[in-house]
């Protein structure tokens, strides 16, 4: 006979002939599987699950020895992880080879069960020393596996004469299948719990770090803005003064974001309305006496990663409108950010000023401010449009927002 499953002699051994005793025996096996299933649902400790499995399988096959051998990939062998009937020092310590010349290795590698009813005359496999030391005469091995991989082998051994048969195999294989799912479920729950704990710790640590970094970045940016301001006042060249002032305003816009972050309870999100209103107040303070800024913002919270380029974009649009829409220095710039659909926001900046120049094309403009507006709009992932409102100019950007639930 080859190394495949069961010989005809093995198959015939131990047959009960369909007697009432045999029927009661098989019904008891089904009850044992059902009871173990209930036990597994309320137990969340893998060693306990494995140990109870060996006890139940020994009872189910009326045997005095049973063990579960877990495969250790790093060692390329099995360890006896749980069992009943074995001498002290076996459980948790004894190891056996994983090659296909052993019954355990063959069952694990091929997925085929192995029944050896006559170990003394077995020619298919070598008899492990552990079995010989315990006087084992017959054994049955089945693979334990789940959907994600193979765990090891479930083995029932007996020191008595007799034979394991197809019905015994059906019981043990069904039990091994249940055990495989149980182990995998428990390992998944443990991995998930561990991952959740690590994630909570990492998030708490990240929150502290981000707040500290935001505080330091805000201070550093404020210093840069101060240096730009000093440079601006130190030069008399008008165009250079304007460029330095624009750069200072951009740096301060980013600094204000980080200032809010390190003071906030949450660092990943920011209140859109309060942040943008604060930005408008800052811009209004630096505007000409006759210039005003009107605003309307949705009461939503938005991801910080999206708020930063959005604030810079609003800063450029409002600054440009105040600078170029009203040469006489009197007029209103309106900004609004309102929802247009689920997870969709629309930024609108408009004025009633002089309007767009002839043949205006934002994509071909050499202006640094216009290039920034185009680039920031793309960074946000929006679709921007310029409209000549006659009178005035209207800029519209529709984008998918990284919204978060509003605060209570």
Image (cartoon, rainbow, N blue to C red):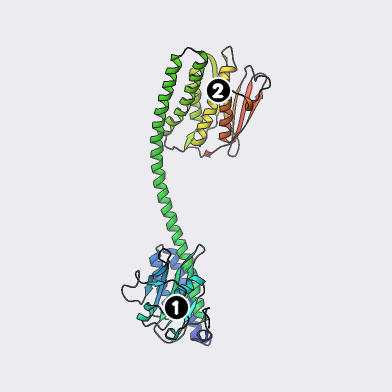
Q: How crowded is mark 2: few (under 14 residues within 10 Å), some or many (20 or more)?
A: many
Q: Residues within 10 Å of mark 1 (few under 14, many from 20)?
A: many
Gap between marks 1 and 2, in whole Å?
Answer: 81 Å
Name the residue at 57% across, 25% down.
Answer: 335
Q: Residue at x 51, y 72 (%)?
A: 110
Task: Single out the residue that lies furthest toward the left.
Answer: 88
Q: Seen in the image, is 316 located left or right of residue 261? A: right
| Residue at disc 1, secondary structure | helix
Expressed as whole percent of the image width and height from the top left, the position of residue 289 reads 52, 13
Q: Mark 1 points at which residue?
A: 60
Rendered position, 5 above or below 238:
below
Q: Position of residue 14 (x, y in %)?
A: 48, 86
Name above or below for residue 116 compared with residue 50: below
> Whole-percent x and y of residue 93?
34, 70
Which disc number belongs to residue 302? none
Q: Name the residue under label 2.
A: 318
Using the image as rendered, state which of residue 316 and residue 188 is in the foreground.
316
Q: In this view, does 41 lie above or below 314?
A: below
Q: How many marks?
A: 2
Relative depth, front residue between 63 and 315: 315
Label located before the other in sequence (1 or 2): 1
Q: Is residue 303 visible in the rendered structure shown here? A: no
For mark 2, give the secondary structure. Answer: helix
Can the viewer see residue 238? yes
User: Does 142 sit above or below residue 277?
Assistant: below
| Mark 1 vs mark 2: in front | 2
Q: Where is residue 283 in the image (x, y as percent from the top left)?
A: 50, 21
Check whether the beta carbons of the residues at disc 1 and disc 2 lie within 8 A of each other: no
């Amino acid at each position: 006979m080859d190394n495949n499953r069961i010989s005809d002699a093995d198959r015939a051994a131990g047959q009960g002939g369909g007697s009432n005793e045999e029927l009661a025996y098989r019904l008891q096996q089904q009850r044992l599987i059902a009871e173990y299933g209930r036990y597994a649902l309320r137990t969340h400790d893998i060693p306990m699950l494995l140990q109870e499995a060996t006890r139940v399988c020994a009872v189910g096959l009326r045997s005095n020895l049973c063990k579960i051998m877990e495969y250790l990939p790093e060692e390329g062998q099995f360890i006896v992880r749980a069992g009943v009937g074995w001498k002290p020092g076996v459980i948790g310590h004894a190891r056996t080879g994983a090659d296909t010349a052993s019954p355990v290795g063959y069952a694990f590698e091929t997925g085929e069960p192995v029944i050896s009813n006559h170990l003394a005359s077995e020619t298919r496999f070598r008899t492990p020393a552990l079995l010989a030391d315990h006087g084992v005469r017959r054994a049955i091995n089945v693979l334990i596996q789940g959907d994600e991989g193979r765990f090891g082998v479930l083995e029932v051994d007996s020191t008595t004469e007799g034979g394991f048969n197809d019905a015994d195999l059906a019981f043990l294989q069904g039990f091994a299948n249940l055990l495989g799912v149980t182990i995998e479920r428990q390992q998944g729950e443990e991995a998930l719990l561990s991952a959740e704990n690590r994630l909570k710790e990492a998030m708490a640590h990240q929150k502290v770090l981000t707040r500290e970094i935001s505080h330091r970045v805000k201070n550093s940016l404020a210093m840069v803005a101060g240096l730009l301001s000093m440079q601006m006042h130190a030069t008399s060249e008008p165009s250079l003064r304007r460029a330095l002032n624009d750069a200072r305003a951009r740096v301060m816009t980013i600094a204000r974001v980080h200032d809010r972050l390190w003071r906030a309870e949450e660092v990943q999100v920011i209140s859109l309305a309060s942040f943008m209103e604060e930005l408008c107040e800052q811009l209004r303070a630096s505007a000409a006496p006759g210039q005003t800024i009107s605003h309307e913002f949705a009461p939503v919270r938005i991801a910080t990663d999206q708020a930063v380029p959005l604030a810079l974009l609003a800063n450029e649009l409002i600054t440009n409108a105040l600078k170029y829409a009203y040469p006489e220095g009197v007029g209103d710039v309106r900004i609004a950010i309102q929802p247009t659909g689920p997870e969709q926001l629309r930024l609108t900046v408009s004025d009633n000023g002089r309007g767009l120049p002839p043949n205006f094309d934002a994509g071909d403009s050499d202006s640094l401010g216009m290039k920034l507006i185009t680039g920031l709009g793309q960074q946000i992932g929006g679709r921007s449009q310029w409209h000549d409102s006659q009178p005035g100019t209207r800029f519209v950007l529709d984008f998918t927002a990284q919204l978060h639930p509003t605060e209570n």
